[in-house]
Image (cartoon, rainbow, N blue to C red):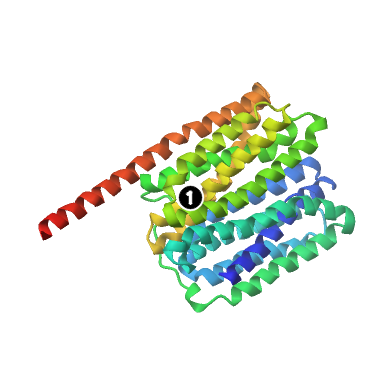
Amino acid sequence: MLLLLLAAFGALTNFFLLLSVVPLYAGGSEAGDVGAGLSTGVMMLSTVLLELAAPKLLARWGYRTVLALGLLLLALPSLLLTVSPAVELIVAVSLVRGAGFGVFVVAGGALVAELVPAERRGEALGLYGVICAIPAIVGLPAGVWLTAQVGFATIFTVTTAIGLVGVLAVLFLPAKAGQVEQGPRVFKGMTGALARPTLIFTALAVASGVFATFLPLAVSEGSRGLAALALLVQSCVVALARWAAGWFADRHGASRLLIPAVLSAAIGTFCVVWLESPFALIAGMVLFGIGFGVGQNVTMVMLFERVKKSEFGRASALWNFAYDAGLGIGAVGFGFVADLLSYPVGFAVTAAVLLIAVVPAVQDRGRAWASVDKLSTQEDDTQVKAS
């Protein structure tokens, strides 16, 4: 587990340090804004596509090989950016790095579920989430700041080295982390038990994509610092809430937290409608951060609980696909709504989307109680027959 956490820290540090740096590098060249947008768009497209292919790769090559492959694809191409800021090279590097990231996150999440006992899975996934969140919190602002201090070439070289340290950690993973059984395709024969947490988490990710992309644009120019603070607070709260939810889920069950998580996220999103109020903005981001962090953990735990061990890769792929697809849908969809109406209306619509997501959460909870009642009835019948 420690080796996997080290590998994840290396992969996520490489990813988030360069997430804003590469568009900045492209934007300062002849590629301009088009190149900046392409660098991120192409990377996320390849990420989503490879997330869907990752379970098949896991079944064929095993965890160690796939994790190492993902890290190599993510880290090594970063060094090529020192050669030239040509848009063709930047797009090609982004395409390969996105593929590596997609493979790694699916394999990493699935291996966490396999390495720990089922009764500690929630807490382990929470810890894994915290380790992955630290590079996101620190890496995004640090990358932009470092470009002015040491230059692009140094950042590209250092991030490559950080990623390769993760490869060394993967190579020392135990032999039991090698083989994975072949499971079904990601969406083939998908049941309601898997669809409900996937759709709910997609809705939460949509809201996250909205805030990450548009909150700094929605406030007045003089409030940009407040927006940055609000996003930082949200990121920190998400990491803590994700770990706390894992601790709770191991002791009391993950599904109990699903409805409160969605409601907290919806209320927090609605608070942001009052953009001119610093209190509403910070409070909204705290409430959304709690809901999003708890939702991250409980939906992942629920997906792993509802598949066989041979399908852990599939569960991880569903969760990661929901995350990345939701981020993209949120950014694009909100842009159209805000352009036609206004930012406050857009945030209100986003809150409404989250409230709609309460419906499958309630349905899922109802089915869970029905299963418990059925099991209790069967146990009672068995005791009567025994008497």
Residue 251: x and y in percent read 44, 56
Residue at point 64%, 65% (across, down): 71
In the rendered view, would you say 191 is above or below 277? below
Residue at point 62%, 30% (across, down): 271
In the rendered view, would you say 289 is above or below 164? above
Residue that numbered label 1 is attached to: 298
Amino acid type assigned to the residue bearing label 1 in the image: Val
The residue sitting at the right extreme is: 149
The residue sitting at the front extreme is: 387
Residue 219: x and y in percent read 75, 30
In the rendered view, would you say 267 is above or below 190? above
Residue at point 58%, 43% (across, down): 290
Residue 374: x and y in percent read 24, 48
Residue 226: x and y in percent read 77, 36
The residue sitting at the top extreme is: 341
Residue 34 appears left or right of 166: right
Q: Nearer the viewer, residue 279 or 215?
A: 279
Res. 326 in view: no
